[in-house]
Amino acid sequence: MRKIIECVPNFSEGRDSSKIEQIAAEVEKVRGVKLLDVAPDAHHNRTVLTFVGGPDSIKKASYSAIEKAVEIIDMARHQGQHPRLGACDVCPFVPVQNVAMADCVAVANELAREVGEKLQIPVFLYGEAARFPERKDLASIRAGQYEGLEAKLKDSRWKPDYGPAAFNKKSGAIVIGAREFLIAYNVYLSTTDKELAHRIAGIIRESGCLATADDGRKIRIPGMFRSVKAVGISPGEPGVAEVSVNLTNYGVAPMHLVFEKIKQLGQLAAASVLYSEIVGLIPREAILDAGRFYQPGARSEKKLIEAAVKNVRLDSPQGFDPGAKIIEYMIGTS
Amino acid sequence: MRKIIECVPNFSEGRDSSKIEQIAAEVEKVRGVKLLDVAPDAHHNRTVLTFVGGPDSIKKASYSAIEKAVEIIDMARHQGQHPRLGACDVCPFVPVQNVAMADCVAVANELAREVGEKLQIPVFLYGEAARFPERKDLASIRAGQYEGLEAKLKDSRWKPDYGPAAFNKKSGAIVIGAREFLIAYNVYLSTTDKELAHRIAGIIRESGCLATADDGRKIRIPGMFRSVKAVGISPGEPGVAEVSVNLTNYGVAPMHLVFEKIKQLGQLAAASVLYSEIVGLIPREAILDAGRFYQPGARSEKKLIEAAVKNVRLDSPQGFDPGAKIIEYMIGTS
């Protein structure tokens, strides 16, 4: 069986389609790599590419895409609602077929060295590739964002794993790593309360949120779902709030239950769900699970997928195309 | 080691202190039984007694208390906010020391036979003493309440386990059973939204709540905490909503986390917690756990209990007296 690794880099450009095409074209040029999805988001001003290939070709394709992004994106001018550190913000490798997590960690290290040395960009390793416990979590590396990066790089605790520690104004920094399959899933609510999405994220995500005890001490209230990360994002359009979710194990925290909980919590604040959105790809099993939840009796995959799409109100600026979004993927026990 | 069983009957009288005293006096008369707590609730018009003793004396005391309640309470005139079926609404036996659940089931059966035969009241067995799966859960037996009891008794599926199937207008029916230790815990919120407590209960309790799928089908959305039962109760005072909670395993779902979640959910609806209340008793370990959550550094039990009481805002119409409320009790693995 062929070795297949998935690569899902996030680039800080979601509006200029010519630039997005140039980056995607770099991936398509590489033999042995298949570009599965290009998901631009104008509001976040961010694009997620999804492509698969063997260890060597995936590394080549990811390097070329990053090189192009670094050439054509200027972080000093970047505006967008999603937390980010650099032109290529994060580049994870995911084991799909006949490869171990260790293979993905190796590819991440090779890419990180090349990006650091040739492009002179600070590189942090995260997830399964992290060398320090505090770099395991993407959110802590990204804390302070691009705007806080210059100061962060002066802190010896944040010495990059590869590349220079000097601030690169044009390109920022890049986070490279390895992780299990992740469903990037956003739920949009109709509300004028700017804090609502943030509060809901704090209730559903595994890490929970901080509260203040009687004596002023900060206490952490654990969240509702294991294997869920979430942040609330300030609405771009007035009256809209977004809960941006990462499902890091859809067997533990399925999309449909996370959707239903966000819907319930929104209702407490008189906010209704406008639609939800999958950024990148979703494994076939995850969407079939949702279909079985809403229509236990349905026999055909087509009916199950329809039931899932309707009930969690999947949509996107381009509409939701199951054929283009659903991949074969069985999550492993990690 | 002495055999100790706890009995926690709920009587449908919470306002007339002379009647409450007469019922409690029946318990105190019995040798070998210790009355630990009398918790009247005027709003619910309901009183919970807590007493402990060996198998024989606990049965004697519970029978006498029920006999007295049946004599002096007239359900045809009863008004109150808590769901109830009869004058003595529910009478559970709980293993505390050197007894098995089977011993409590035996006591429940003996009491049920005596109440059914001598007092001519329909008796349902519930919890660990249930003979039918659909009677395991108190809520399903109590569905329809006293007002719906006459019709329910005509349904052959609801033939009582003991006593007559005929409707007893004055006394209603009684539910007798056996269960693990349970913390009865209420959280009061400041809100004018009558649905709020009901919605929050549906989000936190294990059984979750029903929602409607796209095709009109009812789907069950699972709740947040295992080992939690909860209902929302219509506010007695205007502007107050109550989430009435049963913690059936405080190791799995601790009081302080349930409190914090209700607080968070209330905040989504701009409702704040007024106070929370323990009906009956709370095991020492449960309140110390709460103290450790809020003040991990505190050394003395006194400080831990203080931290718990302050942070979950324990109160009651009589004030909160830790000395009178806290019992030694270690929950078993069930």
Image (cartoon, coloured by chain):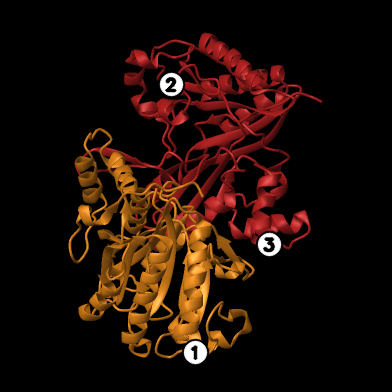
Chain colours: A red, B orange
Label 3 vs label 2: CA separation? 50 Å
Q: Kindly state the secondary structure of the residue where label 2 is placed.
A: loop
Badge 1 and badge 3 both on one subunit:
no
**Which chain's residue wears label 1?**
B
Q: Residue at x 43, y 62 (%)?
A: B55
In the displayed structure, does residue B83 sit left or right of residue A218?
Answer: right
Q: Which mark is residue A170?
A: 2
Q: Residue B283, percent across and down?
A: 33, 51
Q: Quarter of the image holding residue A77?
A: top left
Q: Which mark is residue B7?
A: none
Badge 2 and badge 1 both on one subunit:
no
Q: Residue at x 59, y 37 (%)?
A: A182
Is there CB contact under 8 Å for labels 2 and 1?
no
**Which chain's residue wears label 2?**
A
Amino acid at the residue labelled 2: Lys
Report the residue marked by disc 1. Answer: B167
Which mark is in front, 1 or 3?
A: 1
In the displayed structure, does residue A198 sit left or right of residue A102?
Answer: left
Q: Kindly state the secondary structure of the residue where label 3 is placed.
A: loop
Q: Nearer the viewer, residue A194 or B7?
A: B7
Q: Kindly state the secondary structure of the residue where label 1 is placed.
A: loop
Q: Residue A197, percent across and down?
A: 40, 50
Of the 4 image quadrants, the one containing the C terminus of chain A is top right
